[in-house]
Each structure stands twice: as C-alpha cells, then as structure tokens.
Amino acid sequence: MSKGKKILIAAAVLVLVALVSGLTTMAVTSYGSRNDPLVTLSYLNDTLTPELEKAFNQALEEKTAEMTEKFQEIVDASGGGSHGSAQPSGFSVVTLNNGQTVTCGVGTEIMLRLGTAVSAGPDTPRLIDETGGQSVADAGTALTVNHMYMVTIKGNGIKATRDNTKILIRGEYTVG
C-alpha cells in the first residue's frame, strides 16, 4: 500500500471520528433542552407534585366555602333549624315520655317507631296517614307503628301515651 493511500485512509478515519464525536457532543448537549425536554424524578417530586397539591387544596377550600355558604342559605330560608327542627334532608329521632306533646308546622312528617301515641291538636284533620291514605280527624286517635303521618295544619301533632316512645320526625316541631 502506498504512502498516499495510508495518509488518505488515516485522514478519512480522523474525519469520521471527528464527525461522530461532534454529533455525539451535539446530541448530549441538546438533550433536555426546550426543544427536547427531559422530565426527571426530582422535578416531579420537588416541583410538579407540590404545585399540583397546592392547586388542588386551594380549589377544594374554595368549593367547600361555596357549599357551606349555600347550605347556610338553605338553613336560613327554612327557619334556621329553631325549635328542634330536623335537618332539611333527613329525619331526627325523638324520644318522648308519657304525656309529652309534639306540636308541628305544616308539612312535618312523623313516623311512630316504638311505644304508643295519639293524634293531638286543635284543628281537624289532625294528621294525614300517608301510609293508609286517610285522614286522622279526631284528637286522641291512636297512631299505628311504622305508618308515616303528615301534619297539614300548623299546631297539630301527636301526644305520647307511654314512656320511651320513639318517633322519626322531619320538619318543624317543638316538644312540650
């Protein structure tokens, strides 16, 4: 092999090595740049996760405050829950002793669960038996256990005739 060919081959190898080195250096230095982003575990743990948690907690606090305000408006509009009123969406359990009277507002629902009670109040009909589909006209009419009763005239209600009488009640009421 001639000296000229050896120099040409050596020069070609050097150019090839320089080209490969240059391309490798360029690839390594641009890795993770704006054009080729690299997300690391430390970025996820130290930056992104805390930012997401902060945004989530802030949104949760805002929605909680909003819902609390709306709930308070509903409670205020329904009379503020005074005089033993049940929560707007559910029943309350009330235990009565013999002779205690529950006086109700219009639309209050009562279910006798344990014990005995009779209808009470100044006006007829005293109660509507929603389960039986009939009116309870007379004061002193015995209530049936597990029947749902509705008060349609303010001031009507029920009177317990045995100690430890338990009722479920939803709506405005007072115990006397």
Image: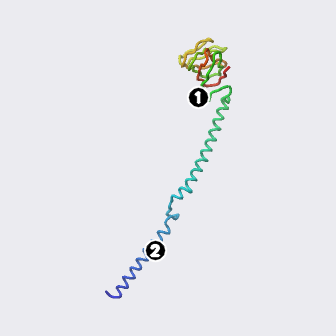
Q: In this view, does 117 lie above or below 21?
A: above
Q: Which amino acid does label 2 sit on?
A: Gly
The mark tally for this picture is 2
Please tell me which of labels 2 and 1 falls first in the chain.
Answer: 2
Quarter of the figure that contains the N terminus: bottom left
- Binning the other alpha carbons within 10 Å of mark 1 as few (below 14), some (14 to 19) or many (20 upward) gives few
Horizontal side of 40 relative to 110 (left or right) equals left
Q: In this view, does 57 lie to the left or right of 25?
A: right
Question: Compared to 172, does 119 lie above or below?
Answer: above
The residue positioned 41% from the left and 77% from the top of the image is 17
Could you tell me residue 89's position as x and y percent? 59, 30
Mark 2 is surrounded, within 10 Å at the Cα level, by few (under 14), some (14 to 19) or many (20 or more) other residues, namely few
Tell me the quarter of the picture where residue 170 sits. top right
Residue 95, given in percent of the width and then of the height, sits at: 61, 22
176 sits to left or right of 7: right
Report which quarter residue 70 is drawn in. Answer: top right
For residue 101, which quarter of the picture? Answer: top right
Q: Which residue is drawn at 60% across and 47% down?
A: 57
Measured Cα–Cα span from mark 2 to mark 1:
75 Å
Check the image and report above or below for 69 versus 148: below
Image quarter where the C terminus lies is: top right
The kind of residue on which mark 1 rests is Gly
| In-front residue for pair 72/46 | 46
Farthest-out residue, bottom: 3
Image coordinates of residue 58 in percent, x first then y, are 61, 47
Q: Name the residue under label 1.
A: 90
Report helix, strand or loop for mark 1.
loop
From the image, tell me which residue sits under label 2.
22
Between 117 and 129, which is closer to the camera in this rendering? 117
